Structure formats: structure tokens, C-alpha cells
Amino acid sequence: MRQNTSSQRASLPFQCFHTCAAPGRDHSSAVLFVRGANHRRLRIELVTFPQHEPVAVLMKYTGSSSGIHRYVSSINIDSGTNFQRYCFKVALLTLPDENDEQQVQDVVWYSSLGMSRERPLLQHCFAYELFNTHPQWAPNLICYEILPDRFASSKGHFTVDGTPVSAEQPLRRKDFEYTDLNEVHCGGDLDGITDMLPYLRGLGCDGISLNSVFKAHGFAKEDTQDYDTVDPHLGGNGSLKRLRALTLGYEIKLLVHGSFAYTGDKHPWFDRQERTGKGALHHQDSPYREFYTFKADGDACYCNGDPKYPKLDYGSREVRHAMAEGQNSFVRKWLRPPYGLDGWVIDHIAAIGDSGNAKNNLKRVAQICTAARETHIDCLMIGNFLSDARYALGSSGNVDGSINYNGFISPIRAFFGGVNLQGESIPYTGEDLRRTCEEYAVGVSQQAKLCLINQLDNASLPRFFTVIGKDKALYMAAFATLFTWRGIPCIFQGDELGDVIASGQIGPDSMIPFKALNDHHASPYSADLQSTIAELAAMRRSNPALSHGTMVFIASGGAYFGYIRIFGHRFTIVFVNSSHQQVKVQQGSILFPLLAALYLPDDCKADDTEDSGESLLIPLSGRNVRRTDHGEGMDALFDMLSRESLDVRCYGATRTSDEFQEKFIKELCAGRIITIPSRTTVIVNNNSKDSYED
């Protein structure tokens, strides 16, 4: 959540902080912290929107501590919807006088977008879900994405055009000069993945996301030919049963990508090659004609104009029956035993709709999700949106989360690598990343944010290691960012190869030297990276702030940014520096959200602070607090921070050491200047009080 944002007035003599109730918190009340102006100069109202109309309630001032005021109010619940939205109206008054009534000097509105002069739009308000409808296990998940044909083979080697190919070392495309690897299967199968489960568990992963496995012509299995059959190249239906049985034993969740928006053009329903004599393309009297939309020239509507992917028309009752609503539909069949998937990743989800376009998209996706949850109430439904997913994330009964392109993948690749998703060079700063990620989070419920899937790589993008110029230190720093970000961290197959990605020319669809991975001897750096990933996974599981906590940006600049994660009495502070020089950051009041949320007691009473007048000017942008703000009055809170049992870890050019930990904690608790080493991510966790109390 932002602390403040842009407005006509350049600055305000106060600073606000609020975060939506995280899962497990009490949704019946809202707490707002204000620093700066004396509480006697503030009149704050909580504005809710039952039945979409604003209702304002005066918030109660409950006390102050260290110059921070605490306001609380019950939330007016709208029982007609699960999504609850609210904002704050803050009036700055004249100082109280014995003879004159206080006059309003300024009024601002505070929402998840920050400060504004006008009442925020409903979609910009703080949001939470009254009832958490998402799987309880999802925020704890650490996932590994697999392209089955290119990951591992039960034979112990790959097979290309009938020739065995070793999995002990990387294979370059030039080794197959006369073979188009995009047109052949390479021998990877689901039983090979089963053999790799101990390795994946040791890496720290407790979830697997399989790219589509259903019968199709292409190796990536996107052009589905049969929704009832696992592709024989991958081992058939029996191999998925075996994989499911073993993943249950390893307590690993199993997700599968599915093509719901279209079929392949070789599917019997469409039958471009006239194999059945009753396909929709060549026969207007075909029983499957209404499954697709045909234009006046007789050709079908295709997904993204690609003739390999004719679009399904969800306006057809028969399509809805086959894909979702029927008892043996595509979405239901694979969620039931003996396959028992734990969820779906719906590819090209924004293209699902009626009449050859995305008409009724939300309605049709909700029908798919409803059918899935009726079959498996605790399943996870993820949408693969290449654009803005918030229209679906804010809709009841829809997807739980999405592949987080806009809120992580795109800005992280731009920050570390200087390129966008199209591979175009762009100058991108820490401030750009902060603004992008803050704006994308606006109006999305905390519960949905925890179900967003974050990745450095996936099957459709160039390898992140090559994008960042093969910088080993930056690669480590980026992994540390991935594992501390809000949402589900997901490793794409081979990410952990590290420098072998470059030396072996491993692309997103290359065969993975799984034998070398399994034995941890791909390269010394790769072995170090695998250990680091396992360490990051263990750290994430040990601190609920990383899996369930809110996320607040606290600093950003040219080549650095910082954020905090808070949940209950646990927190994590993260600073990322991608430059070749160390960065010194003026603390000012950047830790105000953390210190207020952690150390301001519910029963604080005395107000021993004087009004700041205009000596404390907080820019409405809230991004770079003026240097005149030195965090005045917060010394007592920093003292409480110094009493915490803190653990500091470094990932990148600077590695973890007792010497660095001691120095960094000293700087942090002094509240003045923090030094972030070059090409490094620094992570500070507070330990559970149970672990260090007598």
C-alpha cells in the first residue's frame, strides 16, 4: 500500500499508513496510523460503500506514541458482496482555539492509490474479501514449472529422431543441425518427472505446474487433439496417475495448464485434415459446427489469428457441457481421482468467450471455475493473462490468481535486464518498478495478491540469465527478490542451472540435463544456486510474513528499491541494489509503516507530541520523503526494533557474514542511513519471539 501519492498540493504536514486486513486478521475494524500533525488538527472518517453508495463514519482517536496517532473504526460491512471496499477522508483543521471553532484547512482522500483531492474511484479503494474463498494452502506454495517433453525421461536419456541423447550435459541446437526441435518430441515424459520428485522436494518446491499434457501434435501440447487423453509421448493416462500418486506421497501439489479457449485444428471436432468425415471446418451439417464461429468466407475464428488454434464458442451449450458443466467435462474429469489435480492454469484465458471473440469472458470463466470448485472445493484456479488480470481478480467466483506479468515478471525483467517482455531495450529505474507494482496492486484484495504466481522465466520468454547479461551476482539477487515478493514463487525448469544456461545455450524450450541437475554437478555455480534456492525456500516457510504478509514499498531510486512484508508480529525488510556501486539510503521515515504496525500498542494513551506545523512536509507522492524528514520522534520505536532478534542475509556480490549482519543491524536501528552493497539483495527477518525468549 502506498503511503501518499500525487495531488495539486505539493506536500502535507502529516503522513498516513494503512494496510488491508491480511488473511487471519479481524475484518470488523480498520486502523489508520498518522504521523506529523497533532491529532487535534485531524478529523478522519472511514468511508465504506454498502450498495455502492458512500457511507462515512468518524474514526475514533485511541492515542499516540512516538508522534504517531492511532485511529480506529468498525467497518460497515456490505453483506451483499464478498468484496469489501473502503477509503479514508482526512481533514486538516486549524489549531483549536478557546473562542473560535476549528476550520478545515485541507481535505484529502486516502486509498490504495494514495492521496487524492477527489473521492477515489471504487476500484481504487482498499479491498478485501469478507470470506476467503481461495485455497488455504496456496500462499504457502513454492512451485516449479515443467515443460514435460523437455525436462526428464524415465529412460534416463532423451530421444531425438530415434537417437538416444545424453542428459548428463547441455545440448546445443547446432548439435541437431538437420532437425527442427520445434517439430519433434524429445522423449521427456511424466514418469521422468516422477523420478525427479526427490530432487524437486530437496530444492524446496512443494508444487509442480505442468505445461499442457493432453494429446496434441506439438511438443508443447497447446494444440489439443483429445481432452480425455494424456499424450502417449508423455506416457499416457497411466503416467499421470502414477505421478499423482507419488506427488501425494511427497506432499507436492499438482497443477496443469489447460487450453480452454481453443482446440488444435487437428481435434476431431474441427478436423482440418478430414480424418473423421464430420469435422466442423469442412461440414456445415457437422454436429460440432456450433462449437466454433465461422465468418462469412467460411473460415473459422482463430486465437490470435493462428490457424492452428480455432476458437471455441462458449455461446454453445454443447461447448460449455464438454468443457465445464458436464459431469465428465474437461475441467471436472482431471480434478477427480485417480488423477486428482490440485488446480488448473487456464492458458489464453482472456480469449475465452462467445461468437469468436471474448464476449461474456467473465461469465464463461466463472462457469469454468464454478464447475472446478464443485468437483474439487479446494482447487486453485490460475489465469494466464498476458494483459491486465485485475478485471477477473476483482470478480466474485472467478480465478484465484494469475501469472503475474504486470505486477512482477515484466517490471523485474526490466529493472534487472533493461528490456521489456518484447525484448526492447528500456531505461528502467527502481522508481519505475515501484510505481508500476504499486499501481497494479491498487484495488486488488490481499487474498488475491497472495495467489499471484511470480516468475523470472517461463516457456514463452528468453532466459532471464541471458537477459541480465549472464551476471551471476544479479541472478542470485533476483532469486532472493522472487522468494520475498508477495505471491507464489515459481521456478521455471532449468532456472537453477545458472551459468550453464549460457554455456550450454539453454533456451526456454531446450532439453534440460536432468541427470546433471539431479546429481548437482552441472557446474559449481549451479550447485551453489541450488543450495541458495533451498535456503530461500526454507526462509520463506519459516516466516509467515513472506507467505501471508502485506507488502509496502519503502524506498526506491535509480538502481535500487526496498520493501517490507508484515504479518502479525513477524516482518521482513528487503533492499535490492542492481548497480555496481553501493547505495546509501537516507532512512527518514521509510520504516514508519513497519514501526507503527509493530510497536504502536492498541491501548496507547498519552499524546506528548507537539504539532509539527510545517516543519514536517511529506510529499503527496510518498516516494521520496524530503530530507527535512529525519524520522523525528521515532527514536523510541527504533529502540524497540533494536531489541528484536534480527537475521540478516545477503544474496549476490556480497554474501552473508556475521560482520555484515552486525554492521547492517546497527545502521538499521540507528534510523539514519542504510548502506546497500552493490548487485546484492539484503533480507532482514525478525525471528519468532518463541525462538529467543526464555
Image (cartoon, rainbow, N blue to C red):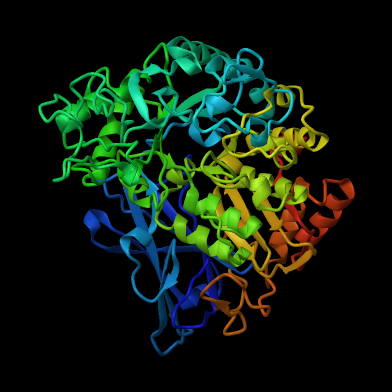
Query: Is 215 placed above or below 204 here?
Result: above
Q: Which of 446/211 is in front?
A: 211
Q: Is residue 373 left or right of residue 245?
A: left
Query: Is 252 placed above or below 98 here?
Result: above
Q: Is residue 639 left or right of residue 178?
A: right
Image quadrant occupied by the C terminus = top right
Q: Position of residue 296 (x, y in %)?
A: 13, 46
**Residue extending furthest toward the right:** 659
Residue ID at (24%, 38%): 364
Residue 602 appearing in the image: no
Query: Is 33 placed above or below 408 here?
Result: below
**Residue extending furthest toward the left:** 285
**Residue extending furthest toward the front:** 178
Residue 29 appearing in the image: yes
Q: Which of 694/291 is in front?
A: 291
Q: Which of 337/76 is in front?
A: 337
Query: Is 555 placed above or below 612 here?
Result: above
Q: Is residue 373 left or right of residue 289?
A: right
Residue ID at (76%, 45%): 645
Total numbered badges shown on the rendered structure = 0
Residue ID at (67%, 44%): 479
The quarter of the displayed image where residue 325 is located? top left
